[in-house]
């Protein structure tokens, strides 16, 4: 396959992937894809809006806020040509980005710090801390 046919096939494959993946938006001339994760504290839960594959960061942010759906939504993570993740640790949020989903999730979990009680102690009500990913996404 010639270089120009490979390039055309790559463009077609990237376009088809963006349409199939459900990301709203297209890449700009530089082939950059933007995403965002917006979060609102709902007391006992989180409202979350996630966007990916947008042509500019402003649109990705605005639509993530719209998807989150509450006035107190805040964009917590912005990513370009990569991934973003949000982790919950005992009701507090931490975020990270990375080149792939595993790296972004690992960075979000690492941002929450080490477990303050790595070993369950049989004293009073000592419990192991809860830590988990609540949202993550990558651009194509």
Image (cartoon, rainbow, N blue to C red):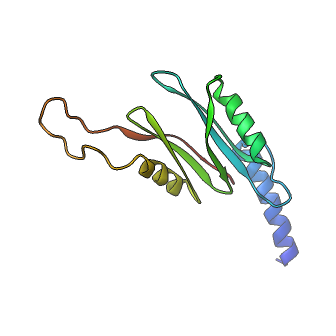
Q: x, y percentage for residue 29?
A: 86, 59
Residue plotted at (65% across, 51% down): 79
Residue 29's place in the image compared with 92, above or below, is: below
Q: Kindly tell me whether residue 121 is visible in this rendering.
A: yes
Q: How many marks?
A: 0
Image quarter hosting the N terminus: bottom right
From the viewer's perspective, tell me whether residue 21 is left or right of residue 135.
right
Residue nearest the viewer, comparing 17 with 46 = 46
In this rendering, the answer to whether 7 lies above or below 50 is below
Horizontally, residue 24 falls left or right of residue 114, namely right
In the drawing, does residue 28 fall left or right of residue 39?
right
* Residue 23 in picture, x, y percent from top left: 72, 43
State the residue at coordinates (77%, 42%).
Answer: 58
Please, which residue is most extreme toward the left here? Answer: 122
Residue 13 or 51: which is nearer the viewer?
Answer: 51
Corner quadrant of residue 127: top left
Residue 24 visible here:
no
Residue sitting at 82 percent across and 61 percent down? 30
Q: x%, y% of residue 78? A: 65, 47
The location of residue 34, given as percent across then percent down, is 72, 50
Quarter in which the C terminus is drawn: bottom right
Q: Which residue is located at x 33 percent, y 50 percent?
A: 114
In the image shown, does 7 or 94 lie closer to the viewer? 94
| Vertical side of 7 occupied by 112: above or below | above
């Amino acid at each position: 396959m010639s270089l120009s046919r490979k390039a055309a096939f790559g463009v077609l494959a990237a376009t088809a992937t963006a349409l199939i993946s459900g990301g709203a938006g297209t890449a700009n001339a530089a082939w950059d894809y933007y995403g965002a994760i917006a979060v609102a504290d709902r007391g006992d839960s989180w409202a979350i809006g996630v966007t990916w594959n947008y042509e500019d960061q402003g649109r990705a942010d605005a639509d993530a806020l719209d998807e989150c759906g509450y006035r107190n939504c805040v964009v917590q993570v912005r990513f370009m040509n990569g991934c973003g993740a949000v982790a919950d640790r005992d009701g507090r949020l931490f975020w990270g980005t990375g080149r792939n989903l595993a790296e972004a999730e690992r960075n979000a979990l690492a941002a929450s710090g080490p477990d303050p009680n790595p070993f369950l102690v049989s004293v009073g009500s000592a419990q192991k801390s809860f830590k988990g990913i609540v949202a993550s996404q990558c651009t194509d």
